[in-house]
Each structure stands twice: as C-alpha cells, then as structure tokens.
Amino acid sequence: MLASRYFMPTLKENPSEAQVPSHIYLIRAGFIRSLAAGIYEYLPLGLKVLKKIENVIRNRMDEAGALELLLPILTPAELWKETGRWDVYGKELFRLKDRKDADFALGPTHEETITDLVRKNVRSYKDLPLNFYQIQTKFRDEARPRYGLIRGREFIMKDGYSFDVSEEDAIKTYEVMKQAYHKIFQDLKLDYLMVEADVGAIGGKFSHEFVVKVPSGEAHIVYCEKCGYAANVEAAKFHHHKLPPEEALPLEKVYTPNVSSVEEVANFLKVQPQKVVKTLVYKADDKFVAVLIRGDREVNETKLANLLKALDVRPATSEELQNLGLVEGFIGPIGLNLPIYADYSIHELYNFVVGANEKDYHYKNVNLQRDLKVEHFYDLATAKEGDPCPVCKEPLKETTGLEVGHIFLLGTKYSSAMKAYFTDKDGKEKPIVMGCYGIGVSRLMAAIVEQYHDDKGIIWPDIVAPFDLHILILNVKDENSVKVGFDIYEKAKSLGIDVLLDDRDMSAGAKFKDADLVGIPNRIVIGKSLNEGKVEYQRRESQDKTLVELEKVEELLKSLVKR
C-alpha cells in the first residue's frame, strides 16, 4: 500500500479528551476517531488491527472445537423477560420500540438469544454437546464512557456459549475454553493474569477473568507470587489470622465528644484501629442491614450483595439513618434493631470498641457472646496487599489491570428459566448445562497499546500489526531513492509481506514521527546511506539500526516472512 493513497490522518498533538496511552495514540496515529461519547469509527489502520486480532481468536476457537455463527443484534424483550434480566440488567441495556410499539433491546450479550436458538433445535442428549461463538458489535449504555476503546457504549466482542448434558461435562468444556483463552492472550504477547472473579449480572456458578496488567486498568487484582493465586478484589479471599485470646474486661460506656471516625476513636481511646469495630448500615434492595467489620478493613459490597442475593446494595444515606433512629458516627450493634452480618475479621476479636447508638458515646471492652450475640460470620472484607494468601499464606500483591476476557460456568440459570431441556438416556427431561465465554475484541486493541508503546507512539507485536513492513523514502525527489524504494516494495509484496511504502512528499522528520506513531514493527529507510549502496533497517522497539547492502535486502525480506 502506498502512503500517498492511504487514509492515515495522524495528529501532532495529544487530543484533549484522551488520558491514557491507548486513547492518545490510537487517535493520534489515525486508527480511530470519536463520533460521540463512547462511540468510535475504525479507520483503515484500526480495522486492519481488529481483523488480525479476530483472526487470532478465530484460530484458537476453531481449534478448540467451537463453531462460529452470527446472531441478531436486535433482540425481542420477551426473551429478556423470560430470564428476568429485562428488569435486572438496569440502565446499561439499550431499549427501544418498533413501529408496533413492541419492546426490543440492542444486545449487550446474547445468553437469551443463543438459548432460544438451542431450545428450538435440541431435543435429545444425542444433539449435545454444542459450542458456539460469534464476533459482533455490542451495545451498553455506560454511565461514564471513558478511556477510548477501554469503556465504550458500542464495542466489538467475541462471545461464546457451550451446552452440555451434565455439570461434569460442562466443566470439561470450561477447561478447554480456559486453555484456548490462555493461548489467545499468549499469541497476542500480552502480560496477563487469570483471576477468580464475581459472576455479576451474567450469573452462574463461578467465573474467571483474564486481566492485562496496566496502570490505567479499572480492575483491581490481588495475586500471590508464590502459588499463583489471583482474584479480582470483588471476589478475592484471604487467610484470616487468629488473634491470641485476651481476658475479658468489664464493658464500659465512655464519653467520646465529637469523635466518630475510626482514627479519631482509636486515638481518643488509645487503642489500635483494628480494635475499633465499625457498624455500617446498608440498603439492600428494599431492606436495611448492618455489617460489622474491623476498623482497619473495608466492606466488599459485591460480596455483601451476593450473600444477600440483592440486586442493589449501597450505604444508607444520612436521611435514612435518621429515619431509622440512628445517630450517624456513633452506630453500634448492641441493641440495634436491624439484621446484623459480621465479617470474619471480628470473629476472634477481644475487648473491642463499638458505637453506643447515642451521640458522643462509645462502648469499649466489648466481647462476643457476653455483650453481643453473633450467630454467623461471613467473608465480607475487601482483600488488600499484604493480606495472607488463602492458599499458601504468603503476602498478597496488588495491581491494577484491564479485563479483556471473562468466562462463566452458567449451570442451568438460563436453560431452566427458558425451558431449554433435553431428554437423557433414561428418557428423563433435564435442563441443558451452559457456559459462556467473552473477549473484548476492540478493548484488546487498546490493551495491546497500553502494554506496547513508548513516548513516541505505538509498538505493535508482529501478529497484529497493521502492516509487517514500513518503507520510508526520505527524498521522493531523488529518482534513485524512489526506484530502490519501489523495487523493495514490489519484492516484499511478492514474498507475501504486507507493506506500507511512504512515498509522500514531506520532510524526513515528519515521516519518522508518523512511523513511530503508527508503530509498524519493521522499518526500512532509504536515505543518505543509499549513496553507499545501503539501506537502513530497524525494529520499532529497538534503537539499533543496521545498514543492509542492497544485494542482501532480499535475504532480509525473506527473514521477515519467517516472523
């Protein structure tokens, strides 16, 4: 391809709306343009990268035995109502009506649609297993679309769905897909972690996320360097140290004027923050509950929502606390007329401090069983760096990452709701056991740039680069330079190399800047060294430049084919 005939609108300055490297460079290098908040146009360079990412995914999915299909983006509300997700999914679901006033949704995911297809066509255990996938545009009405392709309202996704006769078989399929995902992200040369994750709105029995380690990531991960345990903090577990027992001291109500935060109470009463127990009130759907947790820990609202099987969990407002007759800043569990859920962190805590449900007062030397009846304890705390690993007890590390893949063992959540049954060998009707498997294709393009860039621009891995080779003719007014450039260009094409030839009439500096921005992995420069019968070769990620004699250029090109 000749650059003079290609659409590659590069920018000299960083776009004002862009904050992270992928957003900055994909716009500056002419890969994408913004149409509206969270909606992007893929320019020729961007589309080439997307197609190469899709090919990597297709190769591994096909290898794993999955069959590609394509489902409608527009889905009737009736399917969503069968599973209850029409009401549950929330404002992220794009809803619309047709001319007959019938309700439809733009698919953010396709569990209902694929389950409907299978229930209409599967009757017997002989029709199973099945494993499908598609690569398609999805829509989610994000409250705050940001970071370019990382969080958009329209995006490209690979979503897959498996159907088995038993949970045992479904787990085997899940493992096959898990390994396929490992191969995909390894093929893409990404530094990633597979982590335990919360099932969220998709539902199911368990799930894993594939997270690319980047500073701009929205996923918070804890992991163990020794045993390999890793989990999203929404689902992460950790080992709870047992504290040594203490002799119970007399319960005492103490005056704590204008002292309400954990730090203030700890300082005022001269105790460690872990000896202060917070009583936090949450509204879970339409009811209020109290959570007890040690003062140095934070409540994990996802774990709380899962425990309560609640769709919406949030801290109670000041007005709601007042209506409940509670004094904000001094709430405590003794005499509290609310359901109480205690975190494991207070299970073996002695002589601790709680609010007295009275302004400017706390209780100290509180002990379980004697002063407070707690029947059950739960894992409700957010794991953090330094907590003991739940597997080997080594200190956990913490990092941020960008979720690029998510797999779920759905079980019969959707098949039962939608009556997707099969008849087994004994003639009994049973629900099909499902799994689902997603990859953010357009997000992967951003993730790769987040890991592969420098202060000059993008550094594409060979497997997804828009072109394999970038030839720069620095002086297009020099006939010999142009002749040599086109000769190399034609030879590269004959060898099957996807090549971009910069034949534009512009300064050498501008060409180098564009080449660094676009990030094609291999570069041949036809410049001053041509006077010596040589051209310059450089890898984009390296500062090293090699002079290659014209007679050996074909040998160089053949070596690029092997890459």
Image: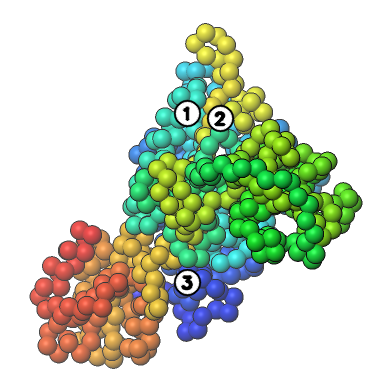
For disc 1, the marked residue is: 170
Identify the mark nearer the N-term, 3 or 2.
3
The residue that label 3 is drawn on is 21
Q: What element carries label 1?
A: helix
**Proximity of marks 2 and 1: CB atoms separated by less than 8 Å:** yes
Binning the other alpha carbons within 10 Å of mark 2 as few (below 14), some (14 to 19) or many (20 upward) gives: many
- The x, y position of residue 139, in whole percent, is 63, 53
**In front of the other: 544 or 6:** 544
- Residue at image x 59%, y 60%? 152
Q: Which amino acid does label 2 sit on?
A: Gly
Q: Earlier in the sequence, mark 2 or mark 1?
A: 1
Relative image position of residue 168 (x, y in whole percent): 46, 24
Quadrant in the picture for residue 39: bottom right
Q: Which mark is residue 411?
A: 2
Q: Quadrant of the C terminus?
A: bottom left
Q: Residue drawn 47% across and 84% down?
A: 12
How far is disc 3 from disc 2 in space, using C-alphas? 39 Å
- Coloration of the structure image: rainbow
Determine whether, in the image, residue 378 is placed left or right of residue 521. right
